[in-house]
Amino acid sequence: MTIKIGYKASAEQFGPQDLLRFTVLAEKLGYDNVAISDHLQPWRHHGGHAPFSLAWLGAVGQATSKIGLGTSVVTPTFRYHPGVIAHAFATLACLFPGRVWLGIGTGEAMNEVPLGIEWPGSQERFARLKEAAEVIQKLWREERVSYDGAFYSTRNATIYDRPEVPPQLYIAASGASAARLAGRVADGLICTSGKDPSLYSDVLLPALVAGEEKGMRKPFSVDRAIEMKVSYDSDHQRALEDTRNWGALALTPEEKVGVEDPLELERLSAALSTERCASRWVVSSKPEDHVEAVRRFAEMGFDNFMFHFPGDDQERALELFARDVMPGLQTLEPARPDGVSDG
């Protein structure tokens, strides 16, 4: 099994028409999947964007023919009732059979607080995510669902247009609890690159395996997906400067705590050096450096890679990466213990 090579459509950076055009190109270039982020507000006010992911997925599905379509990620716990997300993705999966998957996570205050939502602590956010995942999967698989949870309830709820095979459900994880949940109940795990390597090898993946075991599932039955932050260009300086668009990602949790306004995030990001902005990205003009970075994750067992390019010229990034880097990636296989096969 070779790895999957996907494209991260940055809804915080580009408008809906641009993202659609980039995805049509990605499909032509041979990318397997596209993952769109779901933001109410972007990381910066000036020049930022935040198109509605659910509407966009319907449009891009119609404009393409085979590329996989999903979210990385949507939060089905505050702005959206999980039943609404289940309904939306069932319809998308009916329209585009075999192509649609749903990535969910606990969310960010900047996308909920502006609508008057009180932002709770991490324990409640995770408890809501667990319930939401259960509600979504029940609505995809059952009729007349009555559910009484701590946060969500349904009464004889039915989604009348459901695909024969439900969409795959991915759960975003930055810690052990969410990774265990993904291993126990989901079809896939999503995480992001650019952090301490021990987070993946010593925390997330062991927790995922523990979740698979607790759910009495076969080893490696859960897809291991990761957003890879890569800045590749034949001009190294250009690759470095492109990361300035995403300075907010380099801010520490302490620097970002309580910040919900794109104007303030923009101000904090602008004060960072280019080197710090680049710290979460693989920045290189050498294709082999990017292949090697991916190889390290494939050797941990990751099998589904969604590449996030930071620059304003996404067509250039997609084309250069497909031409120079993708051939090396297509030779990689995710590590599996002897005797263990996928699924």
Image: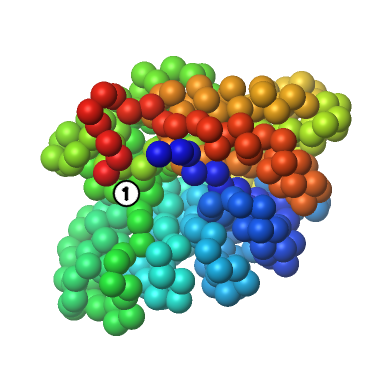
Q: Dot 1 lies on which element?
A: loop
Q: Which residue is mark 1?
A: 187
Q: Residue at x 74, y 47 (%)?
A: 319
Q: Is residue 125 visible?
A: no
Q: Could you tell me which quadrant the N terminus lies in?
A: top left
Which x, y percent locates residue 103?
43, 52
The relative height of residue 111 versus residue 156 in the rendered view (above or below) is: above
Q: Is residue 6 visible?
A: yes
Q: Residue at x 42, y 51 (%)?
A: 104
Looking at the image, what colour scheme do you see? Answer: rainbow
Q: Residue at x 53, y 33 (%)?
A: 331
Left/right placement of residue 142 relative to residue 45 reads left
Which x, y percent locates residue 286?
74, 24
The residue type indicated by label 1 comes to Asp
Which x, y percent locates residue 36?
57, 55
Q: Residue at x 43, y 23 (%)?
A: 299
Choose between 261 and 199: the one closer to the eye.
Answer: 199
Choose between 331 and 259: the one closer to the eye.
Answer: 331
Q: Mark 1 packing: few (<14 Cα in 10 Å), some, or many (20+)?
A: many
Choose between 110 and 199: the one closer to the eye.
Answer: 199
Quadrant position of residue 51: bottom right
Left/right placement of residue 143 relative to residue 251 reads left
The relative height of residue 150 versus residue 210 in the rendered view (above or below) is: below
Q: Could you tell me which quadrant the C terminus lies in?
A: top left
Left/right placement of residue 112 relative to residue 320 reads left
- Residue at the extreme bottom: 160
Which x, y percent locates residue 9?
63, 53
